[in-house]
Image (spheres, grey):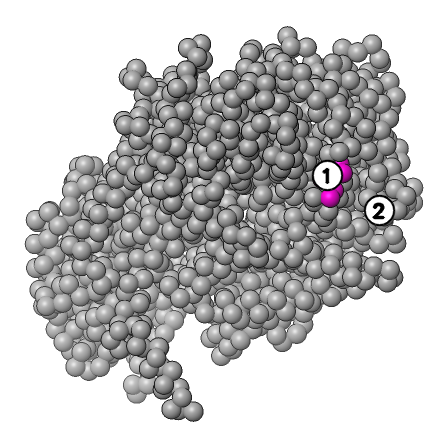
Amino acid sequence: MAILETHDLTKRFDELVAVDRVNLSVEAGEFRSVIGPNGAGKTTLFNTITGALRASEGEVVFEGEDVTALPSYERVRRGIGRSFQITNVFGGLTALENVRLAAQSIPSREMSVGSQLFRDKNRFDDVTAHAQRVLEDVGLGEHAETKASTLAYGDQRRLEIGLVLATDPEVVLLDEPTAGMGVEETESTMALVDDVLAEQTLLLIEHDIDLVMDVSDKITVLNRGSVVRTGTPEEVASDEEVQAAYLGGGHA
Amino acid sequence: MVTGGTLLTQLLNGLSVGMVYVLLAAGLSIIFGVMDVINFAHGEFYALGAYLAVGIAAALSGVTGGFWIALVAAPLIVGVIGGLTERVTIRPLYGRNPLYHILLTFGLVLVIADGIEIIWGTQPKNFAPPALLSGPITIAGFQYSLYNYFVIAVGALIAAGTWLALTETRVGIIIRGGSQDRGMVRALGIDIDRYYTLVFAFGCVLAAFAGIVLGAKQEVALGMGNAIIIPAFVVVVLGGLGSFRGAVVGGLGIGIVQTLTQTYVPALTGVIVYLLMVGILLVKPQGLFGNPEWQNHGGEEGDLLTGGGGGILDTTTRRYLAAALVGVLALVPLGIGVTYSSYIPNSLVLNVLVWALFALSLDFVMGYAGLVSLGHVLFYGVGAYATVMMAMYVTPVFWVGLLAGVALALAVAWFVGYLSIRVSGVYFAMITLGFAQLAYNLVTKFDITGGSDGLYTGYDATYGLGIGEVGQVSLLGDIQLFYYVVLALVVGSYLVARQIMRAPFGSVLQAIRESEDRAEFLGYDTVEYKRRAFMVSGGLAGLAGGLATINSFGVGPSFLFWLKSGEVIVMTLLGGMGTLYGPMLGAGAFLGLKEILLTFGESTPGLLGEVLSQWQGILGLIFVVFVIYVPEGLVSLPETLQARFGAGGGGGGESATDATDAEVSD
Amino acid sequence: MRTDGGTERRASRRRVDRRDVLKAAGVAGVAGLSGCLSDIGGGGGGDTLTYGLLNPISGSYSSLGPFQRHGAELAISQLNESDDFEYEIEIARGDTETGASTATQAASQLVEQDGANYIMGAISSSVALALNSFALENEVIYNPGAAAIPITGASCNEYVFRSETNTAQIAEGAAVWTLENLGSDVWFHIADYAYGQSVLREWRSRMEASDAEFNEIGVSRAELGAQNYESYISEIQNSDADVLVVGSTGGDFVRFGNQAASAGLGDDIDIMNTTASFQSLRAGLGTAGYGIYSGVRYNASLTTGWNEQFVDAYTSEYPDDGAPGNFARVGYDSVRMTAMGIQEAGTTDPTEVKDALAGLETNSVLGDNMYRECDQQAMNPVWVGQNVEPDEGEVADVELIEKFSGEDAIPSCESTECSL
């Protein structure tokens, strides 16, 4: 059963069609990667699925529900989480507070106005415990009280993943989580993803083809906004059209 | 009867006013587009141009063509002054949030305005157009002011020239590109920053020219800059920030609309401009010709620098300090008749407390949710008016009035927030300003609000408990119960605000300030959070306004004057925003400094006294220095000082060492 | 001890106490932010009083405030030198700035800190109305410098004594004169705020009530502080009006007048304004002011009352100011007339002086005068005049055309909304 589907999803900017009738069907628990050359529309596709951009046409279906018209925060509440290509954490707040905010999001809907407004935020034990657990999970337990903006770059990327994780998503869209990292850092980050997001359905945008081949269940290749091919790593690697469109250049 | 001739006259009138707006708005818009500077001082450069022209023309009296020489020379001089201003004051601020430019240019307004007053005095100057251009002229049986033809022609010429320069010269193309999309220009490998001084100076030249042309038609007087700056901003925002075309269309459009409204819909005079601005921004948030992506360039916008974060003082120390401060405030009235008169607590300190509350309310949204409200005086004024009107028309029980004031301020904040929160950044600032100006104009129009005089009752508002009058219940001698009531309300408001910031709601606001995108992708409805925060803030501001009416014996339109919004922003930044207590200290520093300057100015004889009594200019100068060197506000001062002097051990020794080092290296 | 005079409304014991406390404290200890130690009353026992001069030194009316202050200071220094006046007056100074809140705070400072029991000043009617309330609450005598009718009308109180000529007095004199001498087809143009509205109301009602023919051709209202008046001017030019009554002052009228001259309005229509004779307006208008008619409250060339010695003293004391204008006159008369009440009462206590001063026959720059009992408005005569081209320089001279006596110019007690 597919947890996330898109039907003819299209996003246009004036003349430019950035995402062109994309049909995706992602199974629960699947590790799906989306690859394609620069400007293929990968990030725009993510933005349209998560609600950062409003789709021009087509629909996004999550767990059987049409979420196309929902604002992004509603999609998050339903279980679609995302990380950003450019590190986007709350720089002025501590690492723990970052994760705590993420952990607070879903429970906060159940809180009374009184406790929302006046009860000390650290006195919601479930939230705090959850946040601490997530922080440990992403390996930042020691940096709980460190201001996020002063964390090392790799740690900020970890924190980013922690933020996603703490909202308890069903599906996580990861936009180049290893961008700008060295080999070692990349490996440890992917190991982290593997470790902490083992139960989630994952969509990954990634440039490192070897890495993608290594971790993905299925790969979707985008070019100029449309899907060229979806299949297992082996199928994609051997597809001529894909090679022509994408691999042909640098990797021949 | 609307004849063709009447309509033509009115259109020409509109064009001549509009042309002046175009000259002002073009500079303002390009400066904003290229440099991100919201230049409140633009109106003062405009005034400076007019005054310089008066001076030059007077010096050349007898020389034929004095007007023409002044028309050319004064703008050039203002251009040079503008360029220097940019170099010295604005340059150090690039990369910071545009908000800091508001504080800076607000300071510059005070400095330049006082400079003008010192040089040219308070009396209005008559600056007549040359005989060649005066009087009406009849063309084809149609009689019209020759000078207006001149204004339209010369304005069009300059606008066209500017347009040519922007489209046909290399520098112009870069500047125009930069004002539309700075990132793109940078991506092309062009260092747009190098052109800043030129852009600023050029904007000042245009402003000065506008000042001269209009000054000769109206009058050259103090306050002329203040009178023009808000309409000029409206034009810029309406046309679209950074768009020259927008400035031209907006300027001429506003000029014509204003003129026609005056003739055909007089009831809307004064409000039409703001209605238009609010309306257009709500439908088209980037203005008529603005770049729709512009308001999303958040990544490039510098961060707001919030003060505090603890600094070098630990939590316990700060708690003791706060308790000590409240303690001192509670003891102040005991000094009446011993070390000072009742004026100090019952008037001066009380006023400080009210403003501290007002600044606290602004910090709640500005420092925590990143919402820069340029019209916060709206809620202050609404609270004040509602309080007084309840007391006058419904029940003399002051508390009921105060409660009504808070309730109405909350409602108005909900309404304004509902309409405008989704508009971000500078546009939000402008919409709030628009609403505040609407309210300012409305209260002057109706009898029930006392028109331009306001409502003064001899304010006999009672506690409603039959124990006396507010401000009239003496505990002992001149020690007033009301003082303690206000102190308790202000301290209480602070504690409530602080608790909210420690609760889940407040923590989300801080997340929004750090990164609204991210907060939304954690599942928070950020718009809703901001709206609610705006309501809380509006309610607190309304409370401040209501309390302020006691000592002023009522309320008048000055309670809604936009300069108050500017002042409260200045206090907030001065104290250190994002700390809640910083802005409150800022209010104390602002008003205390003013009081000291005023008192010493009056009592010091001679030149020093004269200088000191120009307190506004001195205050302005302090802002300028402050925003450059202590951007995180007063509360960060200990930290800043320690960083600068602390390391080398002993602040005093440091400079001495520096001096020796310098000698050695020579 | 003072008595509270049980009949007083809202008698405010504490404010009286406040000053006593201050004096009892020996004054010497008063430091704080005050730099005005020497100004605090009490040095000479009961023979000293402090006059607080509360004028707009910065803000909207900063071009006029200093004249008001100079007039009052001149009066005080003359009184202090005079043998006939038995009391010593000390001066405390404050700035109203632009709004009621700053003005009342400054007033508190003068009264509570500097010990002022008399205050004079303000030009904005909004500020003056706030100070009206302040004066009642604090039981200090207040001489407002604003012309708005409610100050000695609906908002009057027993502590307010006004030497400024109010809008109704000008209208009483000049409105019918305008109909009879300038034309019966009238256009009103006003600045749309309290002052302009009251001009419209007062002039229109008197024109309607008069026997002369009166046709109201139109009314235009510009917002206060408007920069551009050309649309109104065109409208007026295209109408059948033969006289234009303008209810605006200060910069509003200067801008209007300059634009009217540029459009050639005055060539076709006589312009009558309520304050065009003011020095600052004539200076602001330059040649554009020639020919404009005006209600005149004061002119330095008068030979009435104290005027000649006032003009001499003023010009020698403040040579930079030029000949004194109405604002200086108001400052001067306010203090001098109030001083006669103090002399009459034989005490500096404002609660007693106010009773002695109401209805007391005094002299003034404008001749015999009094703050009449029913509203404590000075019974100033008014004139109609015209701004004419001067013999030298550019600033117009005022030529007086007709005088209306104080009795003729003041509305009847019954028609004011004041009940004292």
Span colored in magenta: C311-316
Report the residue marked by disc 1: C313
Residue at x 41% of width, y 61% of height: B626
Task: Identify which residue, B522 or C294, lies in the foreground.
Answer: C294
In the rendered view of the protein, which quadrant contains the N terminus of chain B? Answer: top right
Is B260 on the left-hand or right-hand side of C112? Answer: right
Task: Identify which residue, C377 or B616, lies in the foreground.
Answer: C377
Tell which subunit mark 2 falls on. Answer: C
Mark 1 neighbour class, 10 Å CA radius: few under 14, some 14 to 19, many 20 or more? some
The three-letter code of the residue at mark 1 reads Ala
Task: Identify which residue, A90 or C396, lies in the foreground.
Answer: C396
Q: For residue B341: magenta?
A: no
Measured along the vertical axis of the image, is residue C236 above or below residue B637?
A: above
Mark 2 neighbour class, 10 Å CA radius: few under 14, some 14 to 19, many 20 or more? some
Report the residue marked by disc 2: C394
Report the predominant secondary structure element of the magenta stretch.
Answer: helix
Q: Which mark is residue B591?
A: none
Residue C300: image location, x then y, percent: 78, 34
Between the residue at mark 1 and the residue at mark 2, the CA separation in whole angstroms equals 25 Å
Is B525 on the left-hand or right-hand side of C68? Answer: left
Is residue B561 in view from this perspective?
yes
Is B323 on the left-hand or right-hand side of C250? Answer: left
Measured along the vertical axis of the image, is residue C326 above or below residue B276?
A: above
- Residue A173, by quadrant, is bottom left
Is residue C72 in view from this perspective?
no
Residue at x 73% of width, y 59% of height: B55
**In terms of secondary structure, where does tag 2 sit?**
loop
Measured along the vertical axis of the image, is residue C52 above or below residue A137?
A: above
**In terms of secondary structure, where does tag 1 sit?**
helix
Residue B433: image location, x then y, percent: 49, 44
Task: Identify which residue, B355 or C120, lies in the foreground.
Answer: C120
